[in-house]
Image (cartoon, helix red, strand yellow):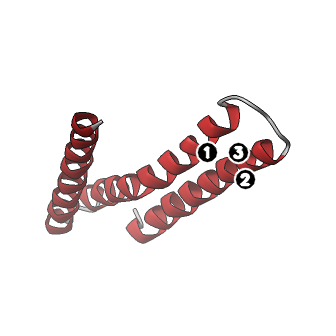
Amino acid sequence: MNVNKAVFVVLTVGMLVSIFFLVLGLSLQFLGLTGRGYTSILYLAILTLILTPIARVLVAFIGFTVNKDFYNAATALTVLFIVLISFVLGLHLHMTLS
């Protein structure tokens, strides 16, 4: 498995999906759609953009594991763990302060 190619595909698809949702949400807002329709789509674009690096690290971990490159797999797993802990702590802090 070519890890670099897999990571490239994940980052490219994540970016394109996020751009699609962003353009769709902004177009709906420009057309004057009222309510939460376009806002939800814009939030989906932001969420996709946030989750893309997490998916990248997960794909790198899987690729390194398949290639039996356990040092890099352990590094990717450590990075994934740190990112997920940061995400959970940030979400908890946001809920606590709101």
Marks 2 and 3 in Cβ contact (< 8 Å): yes
Q: Give x and y (percent) for residue 65.
A: 24, 56
Name which quarter of the figure residue 66 lies in. bottom left
Asked whether disc 3 touches disc 1, contact meaning CB atoms under 8 Å apart, the reply is yes
Q: Residues within 10 Å of mark 2 (few under 14, many from 20)?
A: some
Q: Callout 3 environment at 10 Å: few (<14), some (14 to 19), or many (20+)? A: many
Q: Secondary structure at mark 2?
A: helix
Please, what is the three-letter code of the amino acid marked with disc 1?
A: Leu
> What amino acid is at disc 3?
Gly
Q: Residue tagged by mark 2? A: 23
| Image side of residue 84 versus residue 54, left or right | left
Q: Residues within 10 Å of mark 1 (few under 14, many from 20)?
A: many
Q: Which residue is mark 3?
A: 25
Q: Name which residue type carries label 2.
A: Val
Which residue sits at x=69%, y=51%? 20
Q: Residue at x 78, y 42 (%)?
A: 28
Q: Between marks 2 and 1, how big is the CA–CA gap?
A: 9 Å
Q: Which residue is mark 1?
A: 42
Farthest front residue in view: 98
- Corner quadrant of residue 61: bottom left
- Marked residue nearer the N-terminal end (2 or 1): 2
Would residue 10 appear left or right of 70 to someone viewing this image? right
Residue 96 vs residue 13, the one in the foreground: 96
- Along the polypeptide, which appears first: circle 3 or circle 1? 3
In the rendered image, the quadrant that contains the N terminus is bottom left
Viewport quadrant of the C terminus: top left
Near-viewer residue (86 or 53): 86
